[in-house]
Image (tube, rainbow, N blue to C red):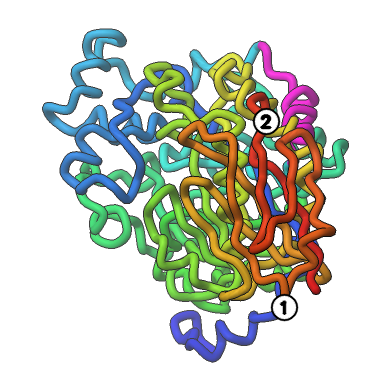
Amino acid sequence: MTDSTATPEDWNKLSRPVPEWFQNAPFGIFIHWGAYSVPAWAEPIGALGTIEDHEWFTHNPYAEWYYNTIRIDGSPAQQHHREVFGGEDYDAFLDQWKAEQFDPADWAELFKFAGADYVVPTTKHHDGIALWDAPGTGERNTVHRGPRRDLIGEIARAVDDKGLKLGLYYSGGLDWHVRPFPPHVTSESVHDTSRPKDAGYAEYAYNHVVDLVDKYQPDVLWNDIEWPDAGKHFGEHGLGTLFEHFYSINPQGVVNDRWGATHKDYATSEYEAARENESESEWENCRGIGFSFGYNQVEGPEQSLTGRQLARHLTDVVSRGGHFLLNVGPRADGTIPEIQRQALTGLGEWMATAKQYLVGARPLQDGMAASSEDPWIRWVDRGTEAVAFVDSPGGGTEAAIKLDAGRFSLSQAVAEGAGGTVQATGDGLNVTLLPDRPGPAIIRVPKA
């Protein structure tokens, strides 16, 4: 096989069963932390997948895209950058990023409390700044400038100390420093016309990811956007060779789907974008607590999900067969903003009871029971029992659930945790919701 002749059949040889640990890992934590955390500014206009390209890129709510947005003439971010920072070079933010209060053990403790199974920090985002001493980056990384620390190594050790799995995000599709293009203003430019596809960049990215695999032995490789086309082969510095190396180091490892039309262990959606991928057999939805991944100082409570709302989102994803990767965007000093910390803590209070009913859960067979929006009801199948998660976004305190008494032992239904109480009725169950519940009420219903 030559460097340029990888076929669908070649990629299919990498296919294998999804490891059991990932099937039983409903919840992960994403971390977007970088030089963009210094300006920490974006317009919180809404969720990806709900806004047209022109408005999205000019008013990008992703603070981690600051370097792109400030280069779009006439954008509010460009005006903000001129007024607040005098239009200084983006790389000045790397030197201003000190991470002086970064406590990786505290982060890992919070993520564990929130109920996470795996943690995925960004190792290099689209700005090309590496959070470890990446080969070929010279001094443009956090070991030599700014924090002057191997941030990935510190996070990896803290995550491992808490018994969590480690994933590593890498932007293989874009690097605005080593392969500069005009600013992106369309999705087509991001995913095709203005992304690097050449062999030199493919080798650069290959060397980075191999180094990450060898140094930190991650359980998840989470690539973003695409992979340079010239590297989509099984030869030297080829993506196929990279996958083979990863699986040889970690046979239980998994990779996501953002490597172009090559290979994946699971599919991804992001906020409301790529929702069609949620019909795949293994998938993961990612989003932030607000509308940004990187910390955005402009966001407040009105743009942010509460712990209870996160509990509903997580449950909805799991009830449809997915995993939920929730992003945390630390400040440049290494602290986690209070809005985010409160949301994670609130979620954790609910997960202390709920997690055992989410791990290993599968979607309930169609026709067994119905989900609804108000009252908010979601179901999962746990073999001998079904579990209903019940809430009322509209503020109601009672929820009637119609069920077939021939399929369920209604009189044996029980409520777990502090969400509410349950009583069997002639045609189903009546759930009384407690006003101070941390999340949806959890109702276990044995099958008949």
Expressed as whole percent of the image width and height from the top left, the position of residue 388 reads: 67, 55
* Residue stretch rendered in magenta on the structure: 101-115
Is label 1 in a helix, a strand or a loop? loop
What secondary structure is the magenta-colored segment mainly? helix
Residue 232, given in percent of the width and then of the height, sits at 47, 73
Residue that carries the numbered disc 2 in the rendered image: 434
Side of 412 relative to 380 (left or right):
right
Pointer 1 with pointer 2, Cβ within 8 A: no
Decide: is 327 above or below 189: above
Query: Is residue 274 visible in this depiction of the protein?
Result: yes
Question: Residue at 40% of width from left, 27% of height from top?
Answer: 303
Please tell me in which quadrant of the rendered image residue 230 appears. Answer: bottom left
The residue that mark 1 highlights is 17
Task: Look at label 2 and name its amino acid.
Answer: Leu
Could you tell me how far apart the alpha carbons at marks 1 and 2 are, in whole angstroms?
Answer: 42 Å
Q: Measuring 87% from the left and 37% from the top, which residue is drawn there?
A: 161
Residue most extreme to the front: 426
Across and down, in percent, residue 215 comes to 75, 48
- In-front residue for pair 157/295: 295
